[in-house]
Amino acid sequence: QVQLVESGGGLVQAGESLRLSCTASGTIFSINTRNWYRQAPGKQRELVAQIHRGGSTNYADSVKGRFTISGDNAKNTVYLQMNSLKPEDTAVYYCNTITPRGNEYWGQGTHVTVSS
């Protein structure tokens, strides 16, 4: 049974930073593609950042230069460092992983609210 547990969300002011964490159990995180998605009220879920098995990363244009995704293999954890937060970053952030076999798993989500 694969479980993903996110933490680190909260309420911050514009310009501040947050770091989200996602810890996996039941899977070796480092061999998977690991993703952070977000869903704002009334909007579709969107891919924010991803880190691949070899360590390469991709970001949505809206967060490039502000967000950084990274992994700690020893802790089986992936992080999303979010700097210079904007009100439009307000959303529920979800951790997602895809195994080499193509199985996909989601975390329960963590709320991020950025006030202006």
Image (cartoon, rainbow, N blue to C red):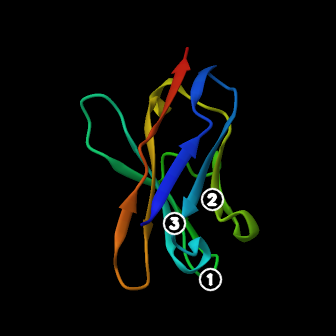
Instruction: State which tag comes first along the sequence, 1 or 2.
Output: 1
User: Quick check: marks 3 and 2 in contact, CB under 8 Å?
Assistant: yes
Q: Secondary structure at mark 1?
A: loop
Q: Secondary structure at mark 2?
A: strand
Q: Secondary structure at mark 3?
A: strand
Mark 2 burial class by Cα count in 10 Å: few <14, some 14-19, many 20+:
many
Instruction: Name which residue lies at 49% across and 73% down.
Output: 33
Instruction: State which tag comes first along the sequence, 1 or 3.
Output: 3
Instruction: State which tag comes first along the sequence, 3 or 2.
Output: 3
- Which residue position is annotated with label 3? 34
The type of residue carrying mark 3 is Arg
- The disc at residue 78 is 2
Q: CA distance from mark 1 to mark 3?
A: 11 Å
Q: Position of residue 10 (x, y in %)?
A: 58, 25
Q: Position of residue 98 (x, y in %)?
A: 41, 72
Question: Does 17 appear above or below 96?
Answer: above
Residue situated furthest top in the rendering? 116
- Which residue position is annotated with label 1? 54
